[in-house]
Image: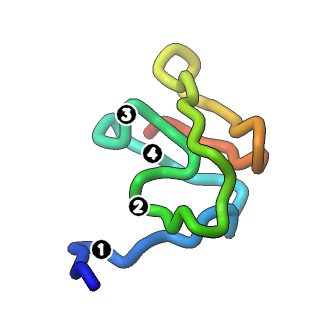
Amino acid sequence: MVATAKPLIEPNAQNQYEVTADDLPLCCPMPQMYLWNSHPRVYLPIEDTGAAKCPYCSAEFTLR
């Protein structure tokens, strides 16, 4: 087992996430999320509007 700096985030566990420029390009599920119980990774355009919604799980992302 590989040690990580931060604990992994449970995907699809909440409907709203705040992200920063460090998280770009934005994808859902995010790299820090478990992948085994989630949907295929999709990249979301958030740079122009500051908000994006995942077409799979309806998670809403806001750029801080």
Q: Amino acid at mark 4?
A: Val
- Which of the labelled discs sits on residue 32, or is there none? 2
- Which of the labelled discs sits on residue 36, or is there none? none
In three-dimensional space, the C-alpha distance between marks 4 and 3, rounded to whole angstroms, equals: 8 Å
1 vs 47, nearest the viewer: 1
Residue corresponding to mark 1: 6
Q: Amino acid at mark 3?
A: Leu
In three-dimensional space, the C-alpha distance between marks 1 and 3, rounded to whole angstroms, equals: 18 Å
Quadrant of the image for the C terminus? top left
In three-dimensional space, the C-alpha distance between marks 2 and 4, rounded to whole angstroms, equals: 12 Å
Count of picture labels: 4
Residue corresponding to mark 3: 24
Q: Is residue 38 left or right of residue 46?
A: right
- Which of the labelled discs sits on residue 19, or is there none? 4
Q: Answer yes or no: do the residues labelled 4 and 1 have beta carbons within 8 Å?
A: no
Dot 4 crowding, Cα within 10 Å, few <14, some 14–19, many 20+: some
Q: Is residue 39 above or below residue 26?
A: below
